[in-house]
Image: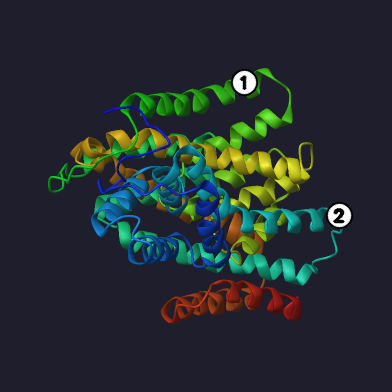
Amino acid sequence: MTDFRPTLPTGIDGRPQVRESAWRVFLVFLRLGLTSFGGPVAHLGYFHAEFVARRRWLDERGYADLVALCQFLPGPASSQVGMALGLSRCGYRGALAAWAGFTLPSAVALIVLARLLSAHPGALPAGALHGLKIAAVAVVAQAVWSMGRGLYTGGAWIVLMLAAAGTALLAPSAWMQPGIIAAAAVAGLLLFKRTAPREPAAWAIPVGRRAGGLWLALFFVLLAGLPLLAALLPGQAVAEASAFFRAGALVFGGGHVVLPLLQAAVVPPGWVDNDTFLAGYGAAQAMPGPLFAFAGFLGASMQTAPSGWAGGLLCLLAIFAPSFLLVAGALPFWNRLRGNARMRAALSGINAAVVGLLLAALYDPVWTRAIHAPVDIVLALAALAALAALALWKLPPWLVVVGCGAAGMVTG
């Protein structure tokens, strides 16, 4: 298999490839970035309607295989699917165009909000900020429930989840989170049955193994090297890049799981205060596109340079860089990897740990910083019920976020 070239003979499902311009790919994903509310599961539904049913960029099996790969890898699954689709249409420029179109609408809006709050701290009333934090309680609670219900495999899974949550609460730090995930992978190998799926259909992958190996090597070099570089160099920019790259590289299970990693990375060092962090996280729920765009808000809110637009762009690129490296690197090896029973057992352990980490984050800092009175509990429960109703009626969740902000102004 030859190395990847921008002009491709076949697509990711082996069918004849029609070359697209990067500009066209950008416009297609820009429309999705402006309208795709509802989180990663909803995003994958939008992508299916656009690229399988409407544009026929790939068939059902090819799309299912691609989604399986991106759910297996750490990082935001919907963004990774978009990058892979762009990569398959017009090479590396297409991957960049797909990412930019899908991510920039929400990222720009969040950076503007961060600059507004920094320049005019009173621009958003205290009651509205408190309402946004209560909205975050409902959103994270819903994520814990839906992820736990979907990933549950038995009593051992529950024990591992609770152990991860307890460890995270007792020893909160940025470095403890990756350790919990690594320990859970080992526990998964020991606790869960190693059953391989049915023999997967072969892919015509448009990325050579040599190129894939180089991208994966670069991923591990940056994952190990950026913390060392941050320790050697006093600059804040390297420290921010290291923290956000690590967060993007170690998130399994969806965008909400990045919450504890980012909170541990930016709040204890004093880069962003906890109230701003939670208010921004609540506001991010009202945005279309990937939740990882929240990194732009945090980068723009930094209390030391780089901040503002420069900080927002730096943190945004750092948190999404692992996704590109992993997608481009794993595609050539996915046929063998997805049929490996040991890898699937380890992933079961990782899934239990990430739900545990999210459960710990639901208590601290989300609950402890937002719930101060009985009326806050009532509002959080109402928001949780509203989220469930909106999902049933297929309405955007930003309605709940806006409602919580307004209710916070009234009750606060």
Q: Residue 315 carries which label?
A: none
| Disc 2 + disc 1, Cβ < 8 Å | no
**Which numbered disc, 2 or 1, marks the residue that appears first in the sequence?**
2
Tell me where residue 344 sits by quadrant.
top left
Q: Which mark is residue 229?
A: 1
Dot 2 amino acid type: Ala
Q: Would you call the spot at circle 1 few (<14 residues within 10 Å), some (14-19), or many (20 or more)?
A: some
Residue placed under numbered mark 2 in the picture:
119
Left or right: 144 in relation to 63: right
Q: Where is residue 124 in the image (x, y as percent from the top left)?
A: 79, 66
Q: Position of residue 38 (x, y in %)?
A: 49, 67
Dot 1 amino acid type: Leu
Q: Can residue 174 be seen in this view?
A: no
Residue visible at 39% across and 44% down? 88
Front one among 406 and 36: 36
Q: Distance between the residues labelled 2 and 1?
A: 32 Å
Tell me where residue 216 sits by quadrant.
top left
Front one among 72 and 100: 100
